[in-house]
Amino acid sequence: MEKQAAECARKAYLSGRSRPLQFRLQQLHALYRLITEKEAEISAALKKDINRSQYDTPLFELIGLENDLKLAQSSLSDWAAPRPAKKNLLTLSDQVYTQAEPLGVVLIIGAWNYPWALTLQPLIGAIAAGNAAVVKPSELSKHSSSLLKELLPQYLDQEMYPVVTGGVPETQELLQQRFDHIFYTGNSTVGKLVMEAAARHLTPVTLELGGKSPCYIDKDCDMSVACRRITWGKFANCGQTCIAPDYILCEPGIQDRVVQEIQRTLLEFYGEDPKCSLDYGRIINQHHFDRVMALLEGNAAAIEGKNDREECYIAPTILRDVSPHSRLMQEEIFGPVLPIVPIGGVDEAIRFINDREKPLALYVFSQDKKVIKRMLSETSSGGVTVNDVFMHYTVNSLPFGGVGNSGIGSYHGKHTFDRLSHHKTCLVKSLAMEGMNQVRYPPQNAVHLKR
Ligand code: NAD
């Protein structure tokens, strides 16, 4: 099945029909229709998968896809046009340029937390660049996954873009096949397996991974605004967002205030009982529920609620005075649990961040330009938003991706097109003016080459 999908996509690609821009535009338009016409079904599937609110599905997945689709449709002829390059003396009368060409067949492996955005956003770039693609959504978001398998062939060329569903064995089988690029979103452990498999065929990879994204709150900042924005970013999608603030770093003197402000915001956002709120999600499954619970062991919470394994419900949980050595601080939390680690100030915060793996996102809340500047220039992360969360992700003119342990390569907007194209170096010379070339031919004593 997996092998067949790869072969089917390869055959479709070799037919050449994905190369004309007209075909690509037609497929992009069809994908746009899918997103807009099937919004209700997509929202319903996410409701079942993760109790996603009807309001958050467009906000966190569909609007971004629509924007990328509109951009790709309006810009494709520009993106695909030859890009002239600067010439040197010997090539002055030649055409010197790069030409984007498709890579071939792309394997897209998506994660469950935003199952539509994480599979279709790379697919937009794959289509725009003229590739075929095998799409493998996550088995954990099973309603979204089966809906995607049902819908995609109704809208797109089904041989060019087959969907393979299934779990680890199916993905492993796919990874045995030869692709021209593998675009994987998920955790870093599996990211290494993907890269290992890709190496066997010298296949390039894009790895969109995760990690612990720190959030530094400076004492000189509007605490109420900062905590409101952080609370939104942490508890949206029940904390299951790759760029959610994973933990807070702040001076001990402001810790109480941070806890109070977050508590106040939680009440405002989700009411007395978040379990009854339409806006508060669920953990994807009991395995992940148990994982998050295990991280909490041995820590006393400042804010917590009654958790419910049957319903995969974890109440918003804030922990104060968390030790950097606790288990909670060793791995990505990926749930509605927010530890606060007290530190002595900006110097210590920078050291703390640099002592750990490079995160996917970094957040700094401060009014002090020097603090902001130091955080930006003295730490490394995939991306940064200052005085807010998530927003760098939403600007599709900016590349989005990780660095080090949080990923390889970046995408969104034109960056996805570039990532999934080969920018071929082209030089076109005429057969005329052969006299000009005398200088490079032996014997070397014929002309004195001037340096
Ligand atoms: P997941 O369990 O859905 O796995 C992702 C994909 O890998 C799935 O399609 C799955 O079938 C496949 N897979 C899982 N185990 C495999 C194995 N042993 N061999 C081959 N394939 C395998 O998702 P996840 O990893 O739990 O996703 C959460 C992680 O992804 C977090 O670390 C999060 O930060 C990260 N993430 C990153 C981004 C980003 O854009 N950088 C976005 C979302 C999630």
Image: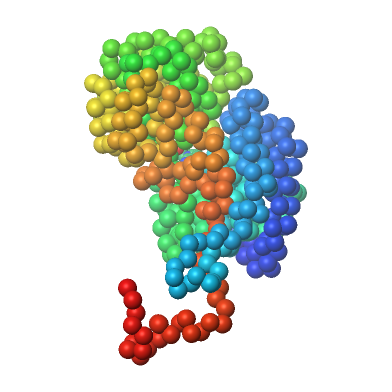
Quarter containing the N terminus: bottom right
Res 349 quadrant in image: top left
Using the image as rendered, state which of residue 252 and residue 313 is in the foreground: 252
Q: Is residue 48 left or right of residue 297?
A: right
> Residue at 52% of width from left, 53% of height from top?
419
- Colour treatment of the image: rainbow
Q: Is residue 398 above or below residue 162?
A: above
> Residue at 44% of width from left, 68% of height from top?
88
Residue 350 x %, y %: 28, 31
Is residue 357 visible to us here? yes
Q: Is residue 125 left or right of residue 381?
A: right
Residue 135 x %, y %: 60, 51
Res 23 quadrant in image: bottom right
Q: How many marks?
A: 0
Quarter containing the C terminus: bottom left
Residue 7 x %, y %: 62, 65
Q: Is residue 145 above or below residue 329?
A: below
Using the image as rendered, state which of residue 264 and residue 273 is in the foreground: 264
> Residue at 68% of width from left, 67% of height from top?
16
Q: Is residue 115 left or right of residue 228?
A: right
Residue 403 x %, y %: 39, 44
> Residue at 49% of width from left, 34% of height from top?
392
Q: Is residue 165 above or below residue 451?
A: above
Q: Is residue 95 above or below residue 312?
A: below
Is residue 69 visible to us here? no
